[in-house]
Image (cartoon, rainbow, N blue to C red):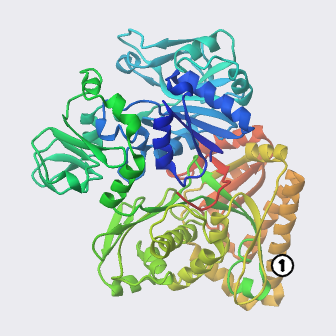
């Protein structure tokens, strides 16, 4: 997660518009070019770095998203800015850009990107150099090379960054493969500090590479195997990417329109039109956008779908350059809210790694003895895997969509919602969430979209965290009223998630939801009693030890899928029988070991931590032999010589495996061994990082 996202603007008027659209969003800063004149992308970057230094904020991870263009070729959204074009999920393009950049390596420094394109590449295969500047490129043919910057470098091995030998702008080439620039650039903080002395002018993709090649700082390029771009370069492309097909085969885009749309002939874009305009009637290829000027005026701009407004001089002919600084963004946003309805509530969350103490959080064990669990909230491949969106419908039905399963269902009665006791029903979790949050069917219509972007049966707390995220989104939508932002009520959502699991008859404890809702590595404890109150204490790991821990840690999906409730039922049965008092002794050992593991991490003693993880894995197998199986044991045997500690991240039986190697070199060796000997087609090593935000509204 970035500590700060900087959005650059061409002037103060454009910056004011961006700020209006980002109002209430934490972690964003809009910086206009100085003197209300364009200074180029390098100049805007230098200007931002100077401002950060003056504020004492030149640290952590910072994203600079260059958004100072006029969006001349897409007049439908010129008043808003191309970075704020609404994507199919209703969120602005800027959100998708930030997510894509956040998935890149989590190195402290500055990442620079373009605000009008979403790059789609595999972040797990991108590495930044330890020093200086790293560009990001991908191999492509001459057609793309002639239109972009091209890195020149000798072939490298694996994903290691390569030293840049030259940088070409739109070379006249006709054949071969070239390292085409993606527009992404990483700058470490020592280089960023040097850049503050540069003039506030120039292009970061032209002058800056020449400066780097001249010895200003080390210059490398990370090469992704492939990259696709979501880029809107014209009205025609805008319509193709975001338009909808009508019943008569016409393609149209209608967004933010309060006026009545009577007839569209096809190839139409209609945006931000107030009711005062009157009925909208457009022939094929005609487009319309309205621009609020001053306190009450409107400028209605009609144009053709293939008008460019840049090369054909229409921008100047319509005097749009003079008009844009006078846009009343408050009126524009108010119109869009009225026309498009309430905003969607969106919740995202990490998953969790259970490091020690699991099962002590499960009723009735925790109700009798209290629980103590050490866990970490993590992102996978740079992403927060859990996503839930709740938005209003005009009817009184509830539509549920699962993005990862590719399924959808419309719930048409209270009886359907009440039928939520079959965990084999993919819709069961959402129906149970509706029940525990007190939703009354028929009181409102809802669109609920859920997604868990990781393998099923993963052992990463997925279902409980997804349930908690669904509950949080429903509470925000139905009680607060579709208001974005705010804080998650961790205690309330956690308690309701336990209720949800009882409704679904899946069992389970409190670890998963609290581990996913709260950031970082932490100890979670509860006292005995029917009402479980969970106290979460962050575990502060010394920075040097944390770096070493992450260099030695791997997360491997075994390919063995399991259902946690089956393991938990056997554990709870064993605890109830408590032969010779052994089960209660083991639970006490689980809790004590979790406290010991947390203490080892606070001291930075990774050897002691490894011993605790191994003890945990041993005790889990003693509580239930089904915690492991032959295939899991085969994986452990394969890496035993290089591993300091191994455990499964969930109840057991399969899912993800956490491995702490004896050294960073051993971690690399284990990765190679697992990649060469995958136990199943789905098995692979996942890049992961500790999440520092927890569950949140976006």
Q: Visible in this render: residue 58?
A: no
Q: Quadrant of residue 50?
A: top right
Q: Visible in this render: residue 82?
A: yes
Q: Residues within 10 Å of mark 1 (few under 14, many from 20)?
A: some
Residue 332 drawn at (x, y percent): 36, 49
Residue 284 drawn at (x, y percent): 10, 40
Q: Quadrant of residue 537?
A: bottom right
Q: 70 or 592: nearer the eye? A: 70
The vertical placement of 675 against 605, above or below, is above
Determine the residue positioned at 40% across, 14% down.
176
- Disc 1, SS: helix
* Residue hosting label 1: 588
Residue 400 drawn at (x, y percent): 37, 69
Residue 232 drawn at (x, y percent): 34, 35
- In the rendered structure, the answer to whether residue 50 lies left or right of residue 501 reads right
Determine the residue positioned at 57% across, 18% down.
201
Determine the residue positioned at 31% across, 35% down.
74
| Mark count | 1
The vertical placement of 4 against 172, above or below, is below
The vertical placement of 246 against 141, above or below, is below
């Amino acid at each position: 997660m970035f500590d700060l996202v900087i959005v650059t603007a061409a002037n103060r008027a454009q910056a004011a518009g961006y700020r209006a659209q980002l109002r209430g969003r934490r972690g964003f800063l809009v910086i206009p070019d100085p003197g209300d004149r364009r200074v180029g992308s390098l100049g805007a970057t230098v200007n931002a770095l100077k401002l950060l230094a003056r504020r004492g904020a030149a640290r952590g991870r910072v994203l600079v998203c260059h958004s100072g263009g006029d969006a001349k070729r897409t007049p439908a959204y010129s008043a808003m800015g191309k970075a704020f074009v609404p994507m199919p999920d209703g969120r602005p393009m800027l959100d998708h850009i930030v997510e894509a950049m956040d998935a890149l390596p989590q190195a402290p420094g500055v990442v620079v990107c373009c605000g009008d394109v979403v790059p789609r590449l595999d972040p797990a295969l991108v590495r930044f150099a330890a020093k200086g500047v790293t560009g990001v490129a991908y191999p492509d043919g001459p057609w793309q090379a002639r239109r972009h910057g091209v890195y020149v470098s000798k072939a490298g091995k694996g994903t290691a960054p390569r030293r840049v030998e030259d940088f070409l702008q739109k070379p006249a080439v006709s054949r071969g493969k070239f390292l085409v620039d993606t527009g992404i650039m990483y700058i470490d903080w020592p280089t960023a500090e040097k850049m503050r002395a540069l003039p506030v002018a120039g292009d970061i993709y032209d002058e800056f590479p020449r400066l780097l090649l001249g010895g200003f700082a080390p210059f490398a390029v990370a090469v992704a195997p492939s990259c696709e771009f979501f880029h809107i370069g014209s009205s025609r492309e805008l319509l193709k990417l975001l338009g909808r097909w009508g019943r008569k085969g016409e393609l149209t885009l209608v967004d933010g329109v309060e006026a009545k749309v009577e007839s569209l002939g096809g190839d139409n874009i209609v945006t931000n039109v107030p009711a005062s305009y009157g009925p909208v009637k457009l022939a094929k290829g005609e487009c319309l956008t309205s621009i609020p000027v001053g306190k009450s005026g409107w400028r209605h701009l009609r144009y053709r779908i293939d008008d460019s407004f840049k090369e054909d001089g229409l921008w100047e002919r319509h005097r749009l350059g003079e008009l844009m600084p006078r846009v009343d963004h408050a009126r524009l946003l108010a119109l869009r809210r009225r026309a498009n309805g309430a905003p969607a509530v969106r919740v995202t969350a990490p998953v969790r790694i259970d490091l020690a103490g699991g099962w002590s959080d499960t009723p009735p064990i925790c109700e009798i003895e209290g629980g103590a669990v050490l866990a970490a909230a993590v992102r996978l491949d740079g992403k927060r895997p859990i996503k839930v969106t709740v938005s209003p419908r005009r009817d009184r039905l509830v539509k549920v969509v699962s993005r990862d399963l590719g399924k959808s269902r419309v719930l048409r009665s209270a009886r359907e919602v009440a039928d939520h006791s079959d965990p084999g029903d993919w819709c069961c979790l959402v129906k149970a969430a509706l029940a525990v949050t007190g939703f009354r069917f028929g009181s409102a219509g809802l669109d609920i979209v859920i997604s868990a972007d990781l393998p099923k049966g993963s052992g990463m707390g997925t279902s409980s965290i997804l349930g908690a995220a669904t509950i949080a989104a429903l509470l925000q939508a139905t009680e607060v009223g579709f208001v974005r932002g705010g804080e998650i009520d961790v205690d309330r959502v956690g308690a309701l998630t336990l209720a949800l699991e009882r409704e679904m008859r899946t069992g389970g404890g409190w670890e998963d939801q609290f581990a996913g809702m709260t950031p970082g590595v932490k100890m979670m404890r509860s006292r005995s009693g029917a009402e479980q109150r969970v106290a979460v204490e962050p575990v502060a790991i010394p920075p040097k030890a944390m770096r070493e821990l992450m260099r030695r840690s791997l997360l491997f999906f075994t390919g063995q899928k399991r259902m946690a409730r089956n393991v938990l039922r056997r554990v709870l049965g064993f605890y109830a029988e408590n032969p010779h008092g052994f089960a209660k002794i083991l639970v006490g050992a689980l809790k004590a070991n979790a406290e010991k593991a947390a203490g080892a991490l606070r001291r930075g003693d990774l050897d002691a931590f490894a011993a605790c993880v191994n003890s945990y894995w041993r005790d889990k197998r003693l509580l239930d032999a089904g915690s492991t199986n032959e295939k899991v044991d085969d994986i452990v045997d394969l890496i035993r010589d290089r591993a300091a500690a191994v455990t499964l991240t969930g109840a057991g039986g399969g899912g993800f495996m956490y491995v702490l190697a004896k050294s960073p070199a051993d971690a690399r060796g284990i990765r190679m061994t697992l990649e060469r000997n995958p136990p199943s087609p789905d098995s692979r090593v996942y890049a992961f990082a500790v999440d520092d935000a927890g569950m949140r509204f976006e």
